[in-house]
Amino acid sequence: MSPQEPMSGQGPYDLAVVGGGVNGVGIARDAAGRGLRVLLLEGRDLAGATSSASSKLIHGGLRYLEHSEFRLVRESLEEREVLWAAAPHIVHPLRFVLPVRAGMRPAWMLRTGLFLYDHIGERRRLAPTRTLRRGHAPALDPLRQPIRIAFEYSDCAVDDARLVVLNAIDAHERGACIAVGWNLVAGRREALLWHLETQSPRGERRSVQARALINAAGPWVQNVLSSVGVPWHRALRLVKGSHIVVPRLYAGAHAYTLQGSDGRVIFAIPYADEFTLIGTTDIPYDTDPAQVAVSAQEIDYLCRVAGEYLLQPVLRQQIVWA
Ligand SMILES: Cc1cc2nc3c(=O)[nH]c(=O)nc-3n(C[C@H](O)[C@H](O)[C@H](O)COP(=O)(O)OP(=O)(O)OC[C@H]3O[C@@H](n4cnc5c(N)ncnc54)[C@H](O)[C@@H]3O)c2cc1C
């Protein structure tokens, strides 16, 4: 895909999308596929923000069942196999081992949740949940002795950044202009059109018009609202989630779903063949999203929860990336 620039002087776009994360490119691809003339503005790089720093899962979100968010879980589960079928080269099934641990959620509750998880979405090809017992399941060997039983269930893993780039390429092939390095800096709504000011990293400016504007700027949505003069009535609440990557902690292609003593759940996931990715945290954040970084407390937390389960200690000095 060759570099593209916003085109002024050729009439208004049907749709301008701000943000080249997974939401922006997905919207641009969908709209271009419906025959709309689409402009996508990405100020930095495609998948340069949240969409390349995720846990890299296509999942229904098992923990949302606890909050009775059945519709959210069902819709996400349905999309899981759709994405797997559409992009099997970057989406693959992943088995998760959820150990049953004394003092945590009881086995009956976990099994009931997993029964729902197996049945409320359109699960066709992914394997169902099964029970693992120590001595009969190698996946329990890397875990500390008191753990004798676990449930193994299905979700999918994805190369998150590639998912974004592939959607952008497909949107481009369907006619969308994917302007990477172009920021939306100002805008106003006038005579049924958005008049948008865009700027390249070299300071070059282009004015474009669009009939509709979609704000897919992730943690910067409020900045975009300000720049186009749209008031917001609710303050945005940002949270940060961090992962650590350490040399591979266990054999096997499965992931672990680990309940911390605070009731939260973290994952340990095979990553790039030689590593294990552990995360995530969930911390309120109120400063510049571009400066987000993992803190020492988050690292300690992730090492501690993983260490409560895994025989092999997880040490701060092992961390190769966070
Ligand atoms: C720790 C963590 C783990 C997660 N794990 C998962 C997971 O496993 N599976 C899952 O499905 N979801 C997961 N999520 C959620 C998912 O990652 C996010 O919902 C998703 O990435 C948000 O994408 P986005 O496109 O809305 O925003 P972003 O990816 O943040 O993209 C916004 C883009 O807008 C651009 N932008 C901002 N302002 C402007 C402007 N003025 N002009 C031009 N461009 C602009 C930015 O440069 C940026 O590239 C996770 C989230 C977190 C935080």
Image: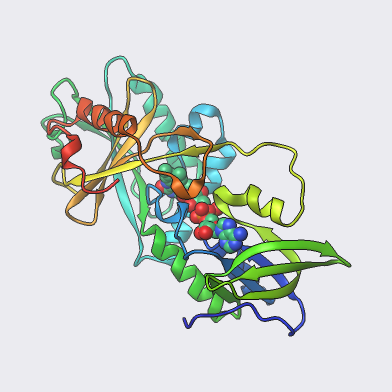
Q: How is the image coloured?
A: rainbow
In depth, the one of 276 and 193 nearer the eye is 193
Asked where in the image residue 188 lies, by quadrant, the reply is bottom right
Up the image or down, 29 lies above or below 114; here it is below
Residue 301: give x, y in percent of width and height. 30, 28
Q: Residue at x 20, y 36 (%)?
A: 316
- 97 vs 80: above or below: above
Residue at the location (37% across, 38% down)? Answer: 280
Horizontal side of residue 192 vs 240, given as left or right: right
**Viewer-closest of 304 and 175:** 304
Query: Residue 150, how many percent across, how many down?
Result: 25, 30
**What residue is drawn where x is 71% and y is 74%?**
207
Residue pictured at 56% horizontal, 73% vertical: 179
Q: Nearer the viewer, residue 46 or 203?
A: 203
Q: Pick the quarter of the image with the C terminus.
A: top left
Task: Return the residue found at the far right.
Answer: 191
Using the rendered image of the protein, determine whether residue 23 is visible from the camera's viewpoint: no
In this rendering, position of residue 61 left or right of residue 175: left
Q: What percent of the width, then of the height, locates residue 249?
A: 15, 42
